[in-house]
Amino acid sequence: MSATKPRTENPNQPRVKRNTRAGQSESFVDLVKRHRRIARGSASRLLQTPASSLVTLFVVAVALLLPALLFGLNSNLASLLAGFQDSAQVTLYLQDNVSVADGQKVSEGLLTRSDIEYAIYVSPSQALDEFGAASGLGDLLIEMTANPLPGAIVLTPADVSPLAVDELARQLQELPQVDVVQIDSLWLQRLAAISNLVSAIGSVLAVIVILGLFFVVGNTIKLAIENRKAEILVIKLVGGSDMYAARPFLYTGLLYGLGGGILATLLQGIVLATFNSNLEGLMQLYESGFQLRGFGLMSSLLIIVAGAAIGWAAALMASLRHIRAINP
Amino acid sequence: MIKFDNVSKRYANGQEALSDISFEVSRGEFAFITGHSGAGKSTLLKLILAIQTPSSGQLIANGVNLNRVSAKQIAHHRRQIGTVFQDHQLLHDRSVYDNVALPLEICGYQPSDAARRVRAALDKVGLLKKEKSFPVALSGGEQQRVGIARAVVNRPSIILADEPTGNLDPGLSAEVMKVFQQFQSVGVCLLVASHDAALIERLNCRTIILEGGKLLADQKPRPQA
């Protein structure tokens, strides 16, 4: 008999043949039932120590909440900016000596450039009319003998990224007819760049948080294994594999991650509600109906699934390592 | 089925628990291992269970070479062996039923199939009425019998028992031995460590006597009159 083929060279045990094959005879329904039983056992163990379970749950939730909140606020900012960014405008104020006809000619010339999407000439008299209408000072302006306003060209760049707009403005400044170039939406574009930075910081934070969660869940699982050392020993003595002994702990990790994820989405709802009540006053001043939106169903699901996956994976790593070390 | 070939076991502290042991127990054989405490009985059982590995010599049990086994092989190997531990090794937060069902659960038996086997095993040791009790509520002898039920529930090809009758009165001891003999008659190989001289005498089985880690004698059963 050789050790390498223990099963095939063991023909003399007809009655125990089932033992070695029994795993295969288990139907899917039985498998689900068995796992449900193990999961229920893990859950009831968590409930046996509600205080420490709750603390761990909160730690997991807060850890998930931080990057999630950052991403959430940032996506709000991005969607707010997107509305403005489409209307990124550059205004060219022309020299006083440029006639209406010349101004229109310059404007039409600009339209042929590929980096300008749209350009329209506003004559000094048009500008005065618009100003009169907008300010309600029309009657007063009639009294004026000369129009102090210059002609202007309002244009929309094809590429609205800050760098491209800056470059366009620099080129336009060199036109002889142009007096001043004003980029209306520059600050918004700078904000967009900051928003990209925030999103990058969020990614780094997410990686750090995942590592942190591995430690938190891993350590909790380690303690749970220590507490049930005797049981694991017995399981190993009667032939349970490391994976079999680890299964309840995998569910513990999964439950921590799942519960933490759900708690994180609830907490972010509370945080956003708090922000929104403060934001309302500010946004009324700007006559904007803008409100912070929650993560939406998909993003919330993503947080919960990510939490569960991290919890499970952390438990898998911790339990296999610590259970392997327990030997009779 | 179990074959010791010049097996020695030295512990890390230099103590030699077993030295140069050679014997073979075949299928359907019932053998006692006896000797004073410290003679090496427990070490011998631990080697068969792959809890310890031999320092030298070759040990084959159930077709598995126990000198070199992987962790996965060890788990599979132990599933083929029913073991009655001296200190019972029961799970105290599970009922008697769940304790006995543990080996079946590990092997992935269907619950209905497992229930039938668990009740049959509990019936054999006379504890059918206690299936819902927890180990702490049982006497030492009852715990011992739960351990025996768990050892036989999986219909193993080898049964090892370390002082299985240590806590039992003579009547119950005889019952337990009867259960063991039933398994022997269907080809199971039994190795029972005991120093219950009266019991060994009465059962008239093969007896392996250890002393100070050495094999002192290997007595065959007396011929029946």
Image (cartoon, coloured by chain):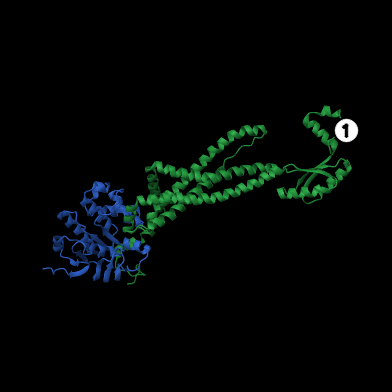
Chain colours: A green, B blue
Q: Nearer the viewer, residue A176 or A254?
A: A176
Position of A226 compared to B203: left or right?
right
Which residue sits at x=36%, y=61%? Answer: A21
Query: For the C terminus of chain A, which image quadrant?
Result: bottom left
Inspect this view and state whether residue A251 appears. no
Q: Nearer the viewer, residue A200 or B119?
A: A200
Image location of residue A71, percent across then percent down = 58, 45
Disc 1 element: loop
Q: How many marks?
A: 1
Image location of residue B152, percent across then percent down = 26, 58
Image location of residue A267, percent across then percent down = 51, 40
Residue A253, relative to residue A293: is it above or below?
below
- Kindly give the residue lying farthest to the left in the view shown: B225
Image location of residue B97, percent across then percent down = 29, 50
Inspect this view and state whether residue A182 appears. yes
Q: Chain of mark 1?
A: A
Q: Which three-letter amino acid code belongs to the residue tagged 1?
A: Ala
Circle 1 sits on which residue?
A146
Residue A209, relative to residue B23: is it above or below?
above
Q: Residues within 10 Å of mark 1 (few under 14, many from 20)?
A: few
Query: For the N terminus of chain A, which image quadrant?
Result: bottom left
Position of B151 compared to A161: left or right?
left
- Kindly give the residue lying farthest to the front in the view shown: B13
User: Toward which corner of the image does residue B49 lie, by quadrant?
Assistant: bottom left
Which residue sits at x=55%, y=49%? Answer: A205
Q: Nearer the viewer, residue B212 or B66?
A: B212
Position of A164 compared to A64: left or right?
right
Residue A175, relative to residue A26: is it above or below?
above
Which residue sits at x=59%, y=42%? Answer: A73
